[in-house]
Image (cartoon, rainbow, N blue to C red):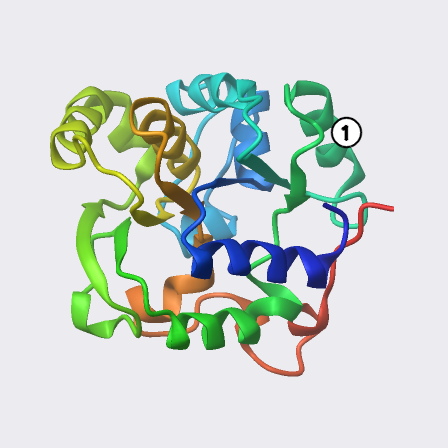
Amino acid sequence: MDKFDTDFDFFWNKINSGENFTFARYADGEIMLMKGLSVGTNTQAYNIDKWSSGDGVSKVGKELLNSLCHHEDNYYYAISSKTDNPNDFNFLVQNIKNSKNLTFVNLWINNNYNKSKEKYQNLKRSVNIICNENAKKENFPFPVESITYFPNDCIKFWESNSDEYLKNLYAKFLNSQNKLFFISCGPVSEIIIDYLYRNFPNNTYIDVGSSIDEFVHGKKTRPYMFDNTIYSKMKSYFD
């Protein structure tokens, strides 16, 4: 896994063929939480995604670290590349147990974003979505089997409500097989994916991140969504 364009096609071929796999994303917010660095009110996380975190490793940070232990052949870690942030790249490579299954954290966005939207428009498989509470089923371009809502301020919510939330997920998806899941719950996405994979491994779990924001929120939320910005043309490279 080493090419921004071919990795994109690789995973979409899996989606369309019904092959089960997991795609967990670890970007700058996740890394800051794992390191115990504060995420304040001057950040995109707070101003756009409605979450923040103080100094010290939170419950989310600890569980994110614990989720780096997968070594299964169909469990892929999407991480910051050397060209995105070399320090984040080195941190993740040192902590991920299965460093051979690495791909790009920005695979669904930046220069691939318009391709992602086209893929979503043409997707025929039904999707189970776990995402922000603003979402409405009719606003997605693909068939939606179910929506499970997640509130704003994911860090604060998870501190007090994680056990109940996971218990409800377990009951809802008990005995699920060969289902497609899109997860977009900020840094908690990776914790949810880890939990679902451990309990119901025969499904596809993808952290689609902000690539579905236009369907969830009805507006563009990131600079890469606007054509002709530097972010809309940006690709990532491991070498």
How far across and how far down the image is residue 93, in percent? 72, 27
Q: Which residue in the structure is indicated by mark 1?
A: 90
Residue at 31 percent of width and 44 percent of height: 178
Instruction: Check the image and report above or below for 200 versus 119.
Output: above
| SS at badge 1 | helix
Residue at 30 percent of width and 74 percent of height: 141
Q: Is residue 25 rendered to the left or right of residue 201?
A: right
Residue 204 visible: yes
Which quadrant would residue 156 be assigned to in this image? Answer: top left
Q: Is residue 8 rendered to the left or right of residue 235?
A: left
How far across and how far down the image is residue 71, in percent? 58, 21
Tell which residue pokes out farthest to the bottom in this image: 228
Instruction: Check the image and report above or below for 13 versus 154.
Output: below
How far across and how far down the image is residue 64, in percent? 48, 24
Which quadrant would residue 48 be assigned to in this image? Answer: bottom left
Which quadrant would residue 4 be assigned to in this image? Answer: bottom right
Instruction: Check the image and report above or below for 46 versus 190.
Output: below
Residue at 54 percent of width and 39 percent of height: 29
The answer to which of 129 and 41 lies nearer the viewer is 129
Q: Is residue 178 rendered to the left or right of residue 169?
A: right
Q: How many marks?
A: 1
The answer to which of 131 and 99 lies nearer the viewer is 99
The answer to which of 5 and 186 lies nearer the viewer is 5
How far across and how far down the image is residue 166, in percent? 22, 27
Tell which residue pokes out farthest to the right in this image: 239
Q: Which amino acid does the dot numbered 1 rest on? A: Asn
Quarter the N terminus occupies: top right
